[in-house]
Image (cartoon, helix red, strand yellow):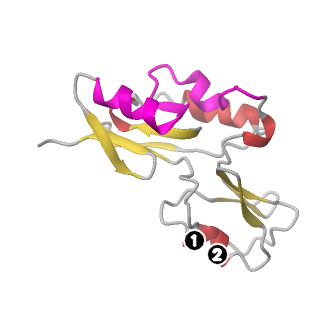
């Protein structure tokens, strides 16, 4: 199971950000930005297969664990190399604790079968925690057929 984002369904309500912050003791790990009031962009980590953040971390504080890429905050030295290496800009630096943080899909904090809080509260289903096939089915049967346009991102493309 993975976290997917459907651009066409996002209304920019930021409920996912609030749920994320509540799950993470006031520190949100995702950002939804709406450009010009029209175009939402997900700031959810794509959990890249060959993660640049993992490759550049000088202290090996970032590792792939199953389907998720996680930061061990106890090993993080706050160099921000991971933030620079992330092609999606989804790694934040917390000045208060001098560590990097990112979405890890709450995998270590969820019971079996549960969805991450961000996906659970999304009123439109723009964020979904599911298998790829389920997301593809939802996207292909919508009024405006959508397809994968980036890692874990679905959107409508005019023909």
- Please, what secondary structure does the residue beneath circle 1 have? helix
Q: Position of residue 133 (x, y in %)?
A: 44, 34
Q: Residue at left 36%, top 37%?
A: 7
The residue at which mark 1 appears reads as 52
Is residue 148 visible to the viewer in this orientation of the structure?
Answer: yes
Q: Nearer the viewer, residue 80 or 67?
A: 67
The residue at which mark 2 appears reads as 55
Would you say the residues marked 1 and 2 are in contact, meaning their CB atoms lie under 8 Å apart? yes
User: Quadrant location of the C terminus?
Assistant: top left
Q: Residue at left 56%, top 27%?
A: 15
Q: Residues within 10 Å of mark 2 (few under 14, many from 20)?
A: some
Residue range in magenta is: 112-141
152 lies above or below 71:
above
**Residue farthest along the left direction in this orientation:** 159
Q: Residue at left 51%, top 48%?
A: 43
Is residue 36 visible to the viewer in this orientation of the structure?
Answer: no
- Please, what secondary structure does the residue beneath circle 2 have? helix
Q: Is residue 67 magenta?
A: no
Q: Position of residue 60 (x, y in %)?
A: 77, 73
110 lies above or below 157:
above
Q: Nearer the viewer, residue 44 or 1?
A: 1
């Amino acid at each position: 199971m993975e976290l997917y984002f459907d651009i066409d369904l996002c209304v920019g309500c930021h409920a996912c950000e609030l749920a994320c912050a509540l799950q993470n003791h006031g520190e949100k790990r995702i950002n939804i930005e709406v450009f010009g009031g029209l175009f939402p962009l997900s700031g959810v980590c794509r959990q890249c297969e060959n993660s640049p953040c993992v490759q550049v971390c000088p202290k090996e504080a970032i590792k792939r664990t199953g389907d998720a890429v996680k930061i061990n905050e106890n090993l993080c030295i706050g160099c921000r190399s991971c933030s620079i290496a992330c092609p999606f800009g989804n790694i934040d630096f917390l000045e208060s604790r001098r560590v990097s943080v990112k979405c890890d899909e709450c995998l270590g904090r969820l019971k079996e079968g549960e969805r991450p809080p961000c996906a659970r509260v999304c009123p439109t289903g723009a964020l979904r925690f599911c298998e790829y096939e389920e997301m593809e089915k939802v996207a292909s049967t919508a009024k405006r057929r959508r397809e994968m346009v980036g890692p874990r991102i679905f959107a409508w493309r005019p023909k």
